[in-house]
Amino acid sequence: MKKLVLVAAIAATTFGAVSTAQAEVTTSANVGVYTDYRFRGVSQTNNDFALQGGFDVDFGNGFYVGNWNSNVSFGANSLEMDFYGGYAGEFANGIAYDAGLLYYYYPNTPNNTGLTDADTLEAYGSLGYKGLTASLNVSLTDDYFALQTITNGVQQGANSDLGGSTYFKLAYEYPISEALAFGVSYGITNYADDIVAIDGSALDSYQDYSVGLTYTAGKFTYGAAFVGTDDDGELVLGKDQGEADLILSISTSF
């Protein structure tokens, strides 16, 4: 996590034309309550409530760092802490871009247990134009959210080799009015090696989707979305964790 902050700080002073001394540094924070925490379509809280929040630092020259946190409930993990840093901007033709590093940290993961580590580092990048965004995340660590790999029907235990696993997502948001917006997304997770599905079979990929509305009134945003996965996604942590469900939320930023 400290490395992300350091990289952003070095970059902000190296790319000379705009420095943090010239740019205005701004900070913001966010907090929200959700009826379920769905990560790439799969519940991380066993279909229960999630309290989430974080903060961001914008250096005013395109560089940023931030942190985001949520309770989780899978394996021995009860907390997820994400640390990220990157660079974002917009081309002259109105296409927005964003690229950086994202580290998922699970402080409750037991050490020296012979199990795969849940902590995961990803590189990400996205392009957006008029409400449509395409993004790609690539795992830079062999350990990938504590998932176990399987080769020739044999579970590999802690010897996972999931570096290079990818997540591709297309998302579209349409403002119906100043307060109401419609959003839809479709994602594909591709594992670099077969993982062990909940039924013991080998799983190499799955798809997820989301369709919903958000309504902003004052400082609060209210959300309702149907989120789920295909049949393969229901094999990652179980059918109940992957099948479609209505997720409600209320959030605010300051």
Image: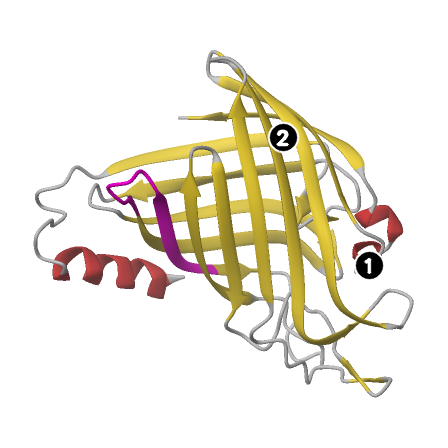
Residue 65, relative to residue 122: is it above or below?
Answer: above
Cα distance between the residues tagged 1 and 2: 28 Å
Question: Is 228 positioned to the left or the right of 51 in the image?
Answer: right
Q: Kindly give the residue lying farthest to the front in the view shown.
A: 93
Label 2 packing within 10 angstroms: few (<14), some (14-19), many (20+): some
Query: Is residue 142 found inside the magenta-colored segment of the image?
Result: no
Q: Helix or strand or loop: what does disc 1 sit on?
A: loop
Amino acid on which disc 2 is placed: Val
> In the image, residue 184 lies at what x, y percent?
63, 35
Indicate the secondary structure of the residue bearing disc 2.
Answer: strand
Secondary structure, magenta segment, majority class? strand
- The question of residue 90 being in magenta is answered with yes
Q: Which mark is residue 33?
A: 2
Inspect this view and state whether residue 162 appears. Answer: yes
Q: Is residue 173 left or right of residue 9?
A: right
Residue stretch rendered in magenta on the structure: 89-102
Specify whether residue 106 is in view: no
Residue 70 % position (x, y)? 59, 44
Which callout, 1 or 2, points at the residue further toward the start of the chain?
2
Q: Which residue is mark 1?
A: 232
Work out which quarter of the rendered image holds the N terminus and state it. bottom left
- Quadrant containing the C terminus is top left
Q: Residue at x 36, y 48 (%)?
A: 97
* Residue 248, x across and y down, in percent: 70, 27
Measured as percent of width and height from the top left, residue 96 is found at 35, 43
Above/below status of 244 relative to 160: above
Q: Nearer the viewer, residue 132 or 113?
A: 132
Mark 1 crowd level (few <14, some 14–19, many ≥20, 10 Å Cα): some
Q: How many marks?
A: 2
For the point 74% across and 78% down, the residue is 149
Q: Residue at x 66, y 56 (%)?
A: 188
